[in-house]
Amino acid sequence: MKHEKDDTTLLPILKDQYGRIKRKLRISVTDRCNFKCIYCMPEHPEWIKKQDLLSFEALLVFCQYMVKQGIENIRITGGEPLMRQGVVHFIRDLQSLRALGLKRISMTTNAHYLAKYAEQLKQAGLDDLNISLDSLDANQFKQLTKKELAPVLNGIEAAKKSGLPFKINCVLMKGQNDDQILPMVKWAKQHDIPLRFIEFMPLDGDQHWSNQAVVSEAEILEQLKPHYDIQPIQQHHEPARQYQLDGQYCIGIISTITHSFCGECDRIRLTAQGELYNCLFAQQGLNIKPYLFDVVRQLGQEKVIDFQQLDLQIKPYIWNKAKGYHAIQHQQARKISMHMLGG
Ligand code: SAM
Ligand code: SF4
């Protein structure tokens, strides 16, 4: 039900007009990526200029404000977050926000550089990882991403060794990698790795998305049915719908297109140049950069936020979040895609 009045600026809480409280913040630390996944990256990306990226210093003060407003989980994403220099250090700096209520610090990565970084991320205090892996077939993987599979598998091994908990995310596209459903499940089950399939969303860089390219949750289950006894599991505020296979192993399916979870959405997203998005499909973001300042104090220069102004902008912006994907899917095309929004 829609509330009549926007009175959220008075509260230390981020709530929208449908009563959804925001607990999760995704921060894209760069739009750059060494992969070119066909469901994500445009053929000719125009990268954000380095000088236009929000500095880690600015991000830290922003995160501090957001945690004070009730954000409990921060996920670092991109582009490819491990391509931004200083990201491990940033994760270490975020630890100071645990005292204010931050509960989890996570990262989503393509794992290409993970063999180098897994241990460092663990030492810096990262809680967990989501790793994207869309095919176990090296040729198909290269077709989908324009990169090699082997470094990703090495990255997954390194994550295991470091003890960092992780999940695998697999985006399915019809005619591209829908033959990977069974191999991916067998592989993940054998290695006891949590696996989630993701329905292809209309967020690809060159806007080639069509409904025909989506492999739906129903189609995924149909392919698995001859091989496993499948039982749905009760969901607990998770975007992924969970299924138990043969009474032992679980998979998740994030079916934004066929079963949107917008009704429970507790996420907001920040792009690498400082635009806040109240929804993956929002027509417009809110530029928070004007509220971040450099001030000179006794011990040197420091980043601060004009909290009052930020509050006055952010809360109504979040309040006005649309009902969800189905309410806004027919809007005009935007120039922003997943490599900028961070997934
Ligand atoms: N580069 C990192 C990675 O690939 O894991 C992090 C950024 S990526 C944009 C975050 C997530 O968004 C990945 O799991 C990716 O598979 C997913 N993604 C990208 N484009 C998508 C689309 N059009 N539909 C569904 N998921 C998408
Ligand atoms: Fe890069 Fe991730 Fe997008 Fe693939 S999904 S192009 S790895 S940002």
Image (tube, rainbow, N blue to C red):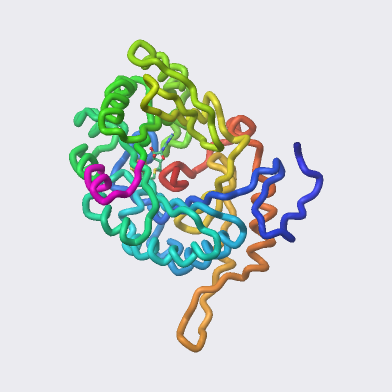
Q: Which of these two is toward me, 122 or 265? A: 122
At a point 31% along the width and 54% down the height, the residue shown is 82
Determine if the magenta segment contains residue 162.
yes
Q: Residue at x 52, y 51 (%)?
A: 25
Point out residue 111 in the picture as x, y percentages from the top left corner.
Answer: 28, 45
Q: Quadrant of residue 143?
A: top left
Q: Quadrant of the N terminus?
A: top right
Does residue 341 lie above or below 215 as drawn? below
Q: Which residue is rendered at x = 48% and y = 67% of the image? A: 58
Which quarter of the rendered image does ligand 2 occupy?
Answer: top left
| Image quarter in which the C terminus is found | top left
Give the total number of marks visible in the rendering: 0
Residue 314 falls left or right of residue 146 = right
Q: Is residue 113 visible?
A: no
Image height check: is 233 above or below 225? below
Furthest toward the bottom, the residue is: 298
Can you give x and y, in whole percent of width and height, for residue 285 in the image? 57, 50
Residue 102 at x, y = what percent?
Answer: 51, 58
Q: Quadrant of residue 110?
A: top left
- Residue 218 visible to the viewer: yes
Magenta portion: prevailing SS class: helix
Between 250 and 24, the one lying in front of the other is: 250
Residue shown at 59%/47% (left/top)?
Answer: 278
- Asked if the magenta segment contains residue 168, the reply would be no
Which residue is outermost to the top? 226
Q: Is residue 58 left or right of residue 183?
A: right
Magenta span covers which residues? 156-166
Where residue 61 appears, x then y in whole percent? Answer: 52, 67
The one of 85 and 33 positioned closer to us in this rendering: 85
Extreme-front residue of the structure: 247
